[in-house]
């Protein structure tokens, strides 16, 4: 989609609530997802993100509120009449059909002519870079291949929105990272709105145009990966997306001069000798090294601050060996720039 | 047996052979004495071998009638059981409620209870409703205990298949009916066929419940054989008829076994 084209709203949630018995899985949620964007719903399990996805697909009906697709109310519209397709967590390929028949299922149901079906299936196989597996059965494919076939099957109807429910969860790390890049590339190629559900914050940061962070049936923050990471709105976002040191009350007052809670990323803290001076644009706090964990690319220090509170400090291992020669029990000074403090709302 | 596996000790092998012989010896006897030249007594070894008893049996019109009745009863009872067992398994796979496990037990009861109990229960129910005893009452009786084989196979297959498969089908534009036709039925086909074959075999050689539910005119093959036994002159003919029963039920059992082998399906 061109940058100039005015972007319309693909999916709009207005005050949507979903109640399962006594459990409120989604709680008065409002959200807008723009046409053509790669949108991630990020949150721990049970935070309501998958329920939101299933309500878009039509497998669940909202208890209250409304969901629209291109401004058309979706209440009462069955899954098979929605211009939305899903890539399932377990892929849900049909084991009794060949890969070709799996991918062509949507067209077969729509009674597309055989020649067209064959042509489109082949195009889809090319799109997911598996041109030669059409005659195989799903059981003869690897996990990564199945994942791509599930994607091809969901894309063949060219839906307005593609829903992906933790599709990379079952893959090993290397394959997952490769698929992250590929999914993003495919999304750009086809220009379809992707709504991607994940509990993996790194995955969400890597692929998304925008992220909604879910917690307990509500959205804590919506923003670009950069906004979410650099300016977390709540203590939950600060700690769920990446790692953060979050301080409140008395400790916040001692460290920053204000009782209002603030978060600071571990890589924005720096370790120095106890007597080193604090630059004018920075603040500092003395403490004792409690733990040192060598992580290859960097080293993580856990510091007990004098007067209470802990700080996680991550230092890049630019020189050989640990960046700082601090060991367990060393006295150190933690230094940070004032503008890397982020004020967050109370929970 | 693979050569790298430990071999069983010889007393164990001996015991295994003894059990197999014990289980199958009576069947061998039937085969042997279907060919004996003696009419009434079974002396060992048979004084001579002949195939005349096959000819004698094929002349008997009442045998063919009994065989036809048995085949009809088994076929229709199997179809009824397949429809009911499949629908029940599908219905239960989609819901969760208190006492759901009890239903499996209730389905199992007609076959788990002694046949005589099931038979009496059916007979008094049929009397109660004033239904005349006929081939159809036999079919009703057989269907009650055949449902379980189909149901168990269907449940096992449903448990193994991904629940999101039906959702995927609907998601791709298929209605519930199309999903049933293109996804549910094909993925369950072998399990249903296996259950159906077992049901057929079960119905074909059933005698106790049949006795309680048959009208005076109906004779199934097992009842025909049973009625033959007191007639000493035709004894080898009975054995030939028994061989027919085996020839009809054994392939069904073997195919059912092959269809479900390697899975967790059960009979």
Image (tube, rainbow, N blue to C red):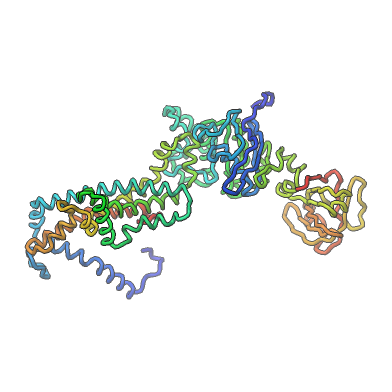
A36 or B91, which lies in front?
A: B91
Quadrant position of residue B184 = top left
- Residue B205, visible in the rendered structure: no
Q: Residue B220's x, y, as percent?
A: 18, 53
Residue A281, percent across and down?
90, 45
| Above/below status of A160 relative to A235 | above
Q: Residue at x 89, y 47 (%)?
A: A282
Q: How many marks?
A: 0
Which sits in the foreground, B204 or A74? A74
- Would you say residue A283 is visible in this rendering? yes
Q: Residue drawn 58% across and 28% down? A: A72
Residue found farthest to the top: A5
Q: Is residue A248 left or right of residue A181?
A: right
Vertical relation: B19 (above or below) B212: below
**Snapshot quadrant of residue B266:** bottom left
Q: Position of residue A178 (x, y in %)?
A: 61, 43
Residue nearer the viewer, A132 or A104: A104
Image location of residue A136, percent across then percent down:
44, 42
Q: Which quarter shows the C terminus of chain B?
A: bottom left
The N terminus of chain B: image quadrant: bottom left
In the rendered image of this protein, does residue A289 appear above or below residue A238? below
B236 with respect to A155 (left or right):
left
Q: Is residue B144 left or right of residue A342?
A: left
Q: Residue furthest bottom?
A: B11
Asked whether, in this view, residue A54 is left or right of residue B156, the answer is right
């Amino acid at each position: 989609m061109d940058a100039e084209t005015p972007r319309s709203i693909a999916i709009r949630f207005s005050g949507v609530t979903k109640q399962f018995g006594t459990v409120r899985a989604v709680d008065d949620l409002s959200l807008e997802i723009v046409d053509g964007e790669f949108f991630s719903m990020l949150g721990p399990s049970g935070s309501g993100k998958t329920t939101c996805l299933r309500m878009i697909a039509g497998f669940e009906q909202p208890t209250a509120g409304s969901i629209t697709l291109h401004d058309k109310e979706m209440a009462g519209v069955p899954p098979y009449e929605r211009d939305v397709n899903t890539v399932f967590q377990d892929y849900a390929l049909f084991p009794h059909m060949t890969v070709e028949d799996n991918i062509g299922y949507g067209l077969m149901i729509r009674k597309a002519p055989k020649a067209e079906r064959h042509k489109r299936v082949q195009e889809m196989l090319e799109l997911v870079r598996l041109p030669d597996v059409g005659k195989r059965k799903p059981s003869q494919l690897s996990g990564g291949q199945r994942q791509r076939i599930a994607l091809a099957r969901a894309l063949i109807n060219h839906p307005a929105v593609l829903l992906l429910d933790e599709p990379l969860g079952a893959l090993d790390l290397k394959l997952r990272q490769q698929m992250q890049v590929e999914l993003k590339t495919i999304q750009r190629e086809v220009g379809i709105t992707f709504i991607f559900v994940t509990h993996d914050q790194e995955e969400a940061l890597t692929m998304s145009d925008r992220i909604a962070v879910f917690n307990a049936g509500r959205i804590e923050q919506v923003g670009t990966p950069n906004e979410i990471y650099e300016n977390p709105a709540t203590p939950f976002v600060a700690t769920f997306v990446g790692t953060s040191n979050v301080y409140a009350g008395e400790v916040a007052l001692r460290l920053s001069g204000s009782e209002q809670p603030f978060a600071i990323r571990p890589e924005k803290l720096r370790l120095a000798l106890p007597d080193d001076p604090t630059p004018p644009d920075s603040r500092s706090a003395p403490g004792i090294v409690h733990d040192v964990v060598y992580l290859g690319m960097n080293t993580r220090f856990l510091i007990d601050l004098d007067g209470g509170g802990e700080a996680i400090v991550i230092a890049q291992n630019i020189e050989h060996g640990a960046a700082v020669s601090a060991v367990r029990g060393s006295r150190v000074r933690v230094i940070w720039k004032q503008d890397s403090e982020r004020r967050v709302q109370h929970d | 047996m693979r050569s790298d596996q430990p071999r069983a000790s010889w007393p164990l092998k001996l015991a295994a052979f003894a059990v197999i012989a014990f289980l199958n010896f009576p069947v061998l006897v039937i085969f042997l004495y279907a060919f004996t030249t003696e009419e009434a007594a079974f002396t060992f070894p048979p004084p001579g071998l002949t195939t005349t008893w096959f000819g004698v049996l094929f002349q008997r019109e009442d045998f063919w009638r009994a065989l036809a009745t048995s085949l009809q009863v088994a076929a229709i009872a199997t179809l009824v059981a397949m429809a009911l067992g499949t629908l029940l398994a599908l219905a239960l796979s989609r819901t969760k409620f208190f006492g759901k496990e009890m239903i499996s037990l209730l389905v199992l009861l007609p076959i788990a209870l002694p046949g005589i109990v099931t038979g009496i229960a059916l007979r008094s129910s049929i009397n109660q409703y004033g239904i005349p005893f006929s081939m159809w009452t036999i079919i009703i009786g057989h269907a009650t205990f055949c449902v379980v084989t189909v149901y168990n196979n269907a449940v096992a297959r449903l448990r193994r298949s991904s629940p999101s498969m039906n959702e995927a089908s609907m998601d791709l534009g298929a209605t519930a009916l199309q999903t049933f036709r293109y996804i549910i039925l094909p993925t369950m086909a072998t399990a249903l066929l296996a259950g159906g074959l077992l049901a057929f075999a079960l119905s074909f050689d059933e005698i106790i419940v049949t006795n309680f539910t048959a009208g005076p005119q109906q004779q199934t093959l097992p009842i025909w054989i049973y009625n033959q036994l007191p007639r000493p002159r035709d004894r080898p003919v009975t054995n030939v008829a028994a061989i027919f029963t085996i020839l009809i039920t054994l392939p069904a059992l073997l195919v059912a076994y092959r269809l479900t082998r390697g899975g967790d399906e059960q009979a």
